[in-house]
Amino acid sequence: MGSLNIVAVVALKGGTGKSTLASNLAVAGVRAGLKTLGIDADPQGSLAQWKRFRGGDDLMVSPGKTSTLHPMRFAAERSGTELAVIDTRASSLDNMLEAAKAAHLTLIVARPTPIDVRAVAATVEALRPLQRPSAIVLNQAPTLRGGREPALVTESIEALRAHGLPIAPVVVRNRSAYQTAFLHGRSPLELESEAAAAGEIGELWNYVEARLRQAVQQLRPAPAVRTRGRPPLPPIRAMAV
Ligand SMILES: Nc1ncnc2c1ncn2[C@@H]1O[C@H](COP(=O)(O)OP(=O)(O)OP(=O)(O)O)[C@@H](O)[C@H]1O
Ligand SMILES: [Mg+2]
């Protein structure tokens, strides 16, 4: 990737799986050879706790207060970080918006249940004025039954389409592997016996990586155009927020 890419993992609703997916995406980044930083912007500290379980120094996790997210971005850039994953706080509009403004891509995590799907509307509407790249990820979905997608999932996807946002092409299922891996500061990507969960996270990472490439391209400054008699416009900052 080279330059800094930032993903914010958000949902105004609690318990959808923000910290779980943030930790898994951070590990996916490390495995892709990226210098990776987790930013725990939730005072609850789940991502920081995960990192304490993990130990080692293959990735760092820093606490990030809402007001410091923006300056942290510049510090991460200076230190050569290539991927930053921001885990955010539920029910805090301010925290979510600051994280989304600092990020190239915002992932809205939702469970495929009627209550959760309805709750996504508030998150989407709050983010809409920012007009920044985002996507919805379904997490904790029931597994296929007899090879068929449960109605809960298909109906949720149908309802979520109404928001007009991309929906990640991989559905993350409800698997104990995510819970046990988290307890050990790991991701199923690192556990040989958890191929199904590892496959999901691998697919989610491929999607996130592709969207990040697109987003960074979109946000790149346009070349300055020389107009007769006027000096060229100064380049626009890549991440004007
Ligand atoms: N795909 C999954 N399969 C099974 N359990 C999951 C999955 N994703 C998350 N969980 C579990 O659901 C619970 C909530 O997950 P998590 O803490 O990641 O959510 P959160 O959105 O960060 O919550 P909060 O809003 O409190 O910060 C945890 O017990 C976690 O282990
Ligand atoms: Mg959390």
Image: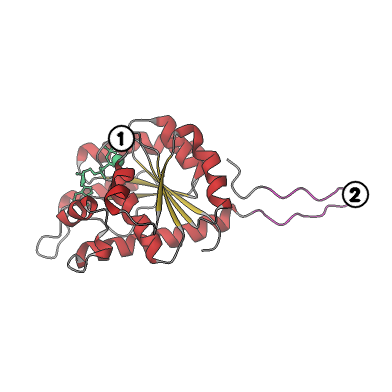
Q: Nearer the viewer, residue 53 or 231?
A: 53
Q: Position of residue 192 (x, y in %)?
A: 21, 69
Answer whether residue 140 is magenta in the image: no
Q: Position of residue 4 (x, y in %)?
A: 53, 55
Q: Quadrant of residue 194?
A: bottom left
- Quick one: label 2 or label 1, which is nearer the N terminus? 1
Q: Residue reaching furthest right? A: 229
Disc 2 to disc 1, C-alpha distance? 56 Å
Q: Amino acid at mark 2?
A: Gly
Q: Amino acid at mark 1?
A: Gln
How busy is the neighbourhood of tag 1: few (under 14 within 10 Å), some, or many (20 plus)?
Answer: few
Q: Quadrant of residue 241?
A: top right
Instruction: Determine the secondary structure under disc 1.
Output: loop
* Ligand 2 located in image quadrant: top left
Instruction: Determine the secondary structure under disc 2.
Output: loop
Q: Judge whether 31 appears above or below 85 on screen.
A: below
Does the rendering let one see residue 137? Answer: no
Q: Quadrant of residue 94?
A: top left
Disc 1 residue lies near ligand 1 with CB under 8 A: yes
In the image, what residue occupies the spot 53% across and 45% down? 73
Does the rendering let one see residue 188? Answer: yes
Q: Give the residues drawn in magenta, as a range.
A: 221-236
Which mark identifies residue 44? Answer: 1
Which mark identifies residue 174? Answer: none
Q: Position of residue 138 (x, y in %)?
A: 27, 50
Q: Residue reaching furthest front? A: 56
- Find disc 2 in the rendering and name its residue: 229
Answer whether residue 234 is magenta in the image: yes
Q: Nearer the viewer, residue 223 or 114?
A: 223
